[in-house]
Amino acid sequence: MIHYHGGPITPDTCALKAWKGRHAFISFAHSGQINLAAEYCQSFALDNGAFTAWKAAGKNKIDWSDYYEFVARWKNHPGFDFAIIPDVIDGGEEENEALLHEWPHGEFFGVPVWHMNESDNRFFRLCNEYPRVAIGSYGDYDVKRPNLAVARMKDLIRHVTDDYGQPVT
């Protein structure tokens, strides 16, 4: 498993210490250190910044075209690993499915977000269709209730991994 160190880390000198030869996770909402990460990290991944926008504005109706352009700018960089496909934090499966269909960069570059309040079947399907799946906590599985979230993940993960914890293919 690769551990990505989230940014921003300030000042830049501290970011350099944390990231040099490691892996960075850069949010579109705070992308000021993308050049630093691209130059010094072993690899980096991009986050859509949906949570930041949702917390700041309390809304999910976001025009993602700037993010899509941002990903297009970086996806061919040799250190680029993946980008999180936009998601609707407190939305339903239909809204999140629509964003999967809108995603212009393909399955290899994109990582969908499955929210823990969504159906098991959606999680299983995403695990079968994408090389990676991000997991978002919301509703009953908010980070304030970690035991419930861990129990849910333990129940689900056994359906997509083998006896050694490796993905079932």
Image (tube, rainbow, N blue to C red):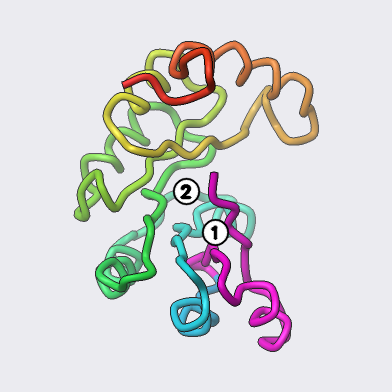
Looking at marks 2 and 1 on the same chain, the residue that comes earlier in the sequence is marked by 1
Q: Distance between the residues labelled 2 and 1?
A: 8 Å
| The label number, if any, that marks residue 60 in the structure image | 2
The quarter of the picture where residue 167 lies is top left
Quarter containing the N terminus? top right
Q: Is 32 above or below relative to 124?
A: below
Magenta stretch containing residue 104, yes or no? no
Tell me which amino acid carries mark 2: Asn
Residue 107 spot, x, y in % from top left: 24, 44
- Give amino acid for label 1: Ala
Q: Give the range drawn in magenta.
A: 1-29
Closer to us: 38 or 1: 1
Q: Which mark is residue 61?
A: none
> Could you tell me residue 37's position as x and y percent?
51, 77
Q: From this view, report whether residue 75 is shown above or below residue 10.
A: above
> Are dots 2 and 1 in contact, CB under 8 Å?
yes
At x 68%, y 22%, the residue is 140
Instruction: Identify whether 48 is placed above or below 70.
Output: above
Above or below: residue 110 compared with residue 160: below
Magenta-colored stretch includes residue 20 = yes
User: Badge 2, how many Cα within 10 Å: few under 14, some, many 20+?
Assistant: some
The image's mark for residue 53 is 1
Left or right, residue 153 beside residue 149: left
Q: In this view, does 151 lie to the left or right of 60?
A: right
Q: Is mark 1 on a helix, strand or loop?
A: helix
Rendered image quadrant of residue 160: top left
